[in-house]
Amino acid sequence: MSWTIRKPEVLKEKLRLLKLNLAKRIRICEGMQVLDVGCGQGTFTACIAKIVGETGKVVAVDITDEYLKEMDENLEKYNVSRVVNFVKADAAHLSSVLLHEEFDAVVSYRFIEELTQPHKLSRIIVEMVKLVRENGIVAMIELSTKTRNMAEGNLIRLHRDIGGDYFPAEVEILQHMKNARLKKAQVDTVETNIWYSPAVYLKGNISQDEFWEEFRERIMKELWPSIKRYGMKYPPINIFSGRKPIIKD
């Protein structure tokens, strides 16, 4: 396709702009105090920090610090290091290491799919709610599995069928949010137009180098023929969001 991305650096910038737009869609604003759960390499963290600016604060949480070097590099690249603090913590026990109602928003980007213990999702959402202020935002951004073409299907198959990532039904996530007493729990879908070529995928410059090596044999056997023919495309993005109720006296 004429709009297929053929250079890794172009793909990386397209993904950064997508994340920046998503951060704005969940109403991140200048001066806010934001908690980013499951920050990983910090690409979404950097986008949040860029928006909240010097008058805001971002706390980035992950269960491991193995990606801390990459996160620091991303923060330095966009000159937002002073805005971000990293905390190593289990998302299911956030309230034991962070203050209750400390944040204007508690968010995550493609965190649910990385859960190795999916049964903890309901508890994690409860913990997120504890840390956000009254009327504050809780938002979880995930890939939609409702694909419309083979290129989108390739990306989902890569992560779900080969990588074993967790993609619960939309209604399940919304029910967990309602059970955590979030009001106006809803899912909004954002379309993407990020198509990339087989050559870009092979170059491994899209934060999946280790993933690629671990599953190389299966990918080449089970998925590569389809990637080679159709390429890959980011599917629609689901934004699950709600607000913490205001407790009346």
Image (tube, rainbow, N blue to C red):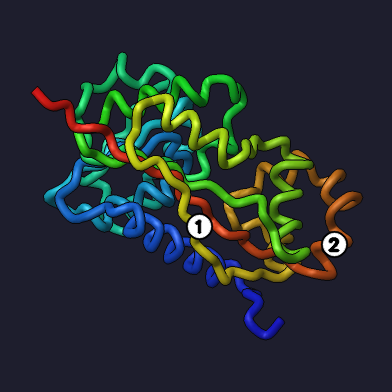
Query: Could you tell me how far apart the alpha carbons at marks 1 and 2 are, in whole angstroms?
Result: 26 Å
> Of the residues tagged 1 and 2, which is closer to the observer?
1
Report the residue at 91% width, 50% height from top: 221
Picture coordinates of residue 172 (x, y %)?
Answer: 56, 33
Instruction: Mark yes or no: residue 77 visible.
Output: no
Against 16, residue 163 (above or below) is above
Residue that lies at the very extreme toward the top in this rendered image: 96
Left or right: 35, with 171 as reference point: left
Q: Residues within 10 Å of mark 2 (few under 14, many from 20)?
A: some
Query: Residue pushed farthest bottom?
Result: 2
Dot 1 alpha-carbon crowd within 10 angstroms: few under 14, some 14 to 19, many 20 or more = some
Where 152 sits versus 41, above or below?
A: below
> Residue at point 19% right, 46% down?
32
The answer to which of 179 and 105 lies nearer the viewer is: 179
The N terminus: image quadrant: bottom right
Residue 83 rendering spot, x and y as whole percentages = 22, 46
Q: Which mark is residue 189?
A: 1
Residue with the most extreme right position: 221
In the image, 74 versus 222, the foreground residue is 222
State which quadrant residue 30 falls in: bottom left
Which residue shows up at 32% across the image and 59% down it?
24
* Snapshot quadrant of residue 231: bottom right
Contact flag, marks 1 and 2 (Cβ < 8 Å): no
- Name the residue type under label 2: Ser
Between disc 1 and disc 2, whose residue precedes? Answer: 1
The residue under label 1 is which amino acid type?
Thr
- As helix, strand or loop, the secondary structure at mark 2 comes to helix
In the image, residue 215 above or below residue 226: above
Query: What residue is disc 2 on?
Result: 226
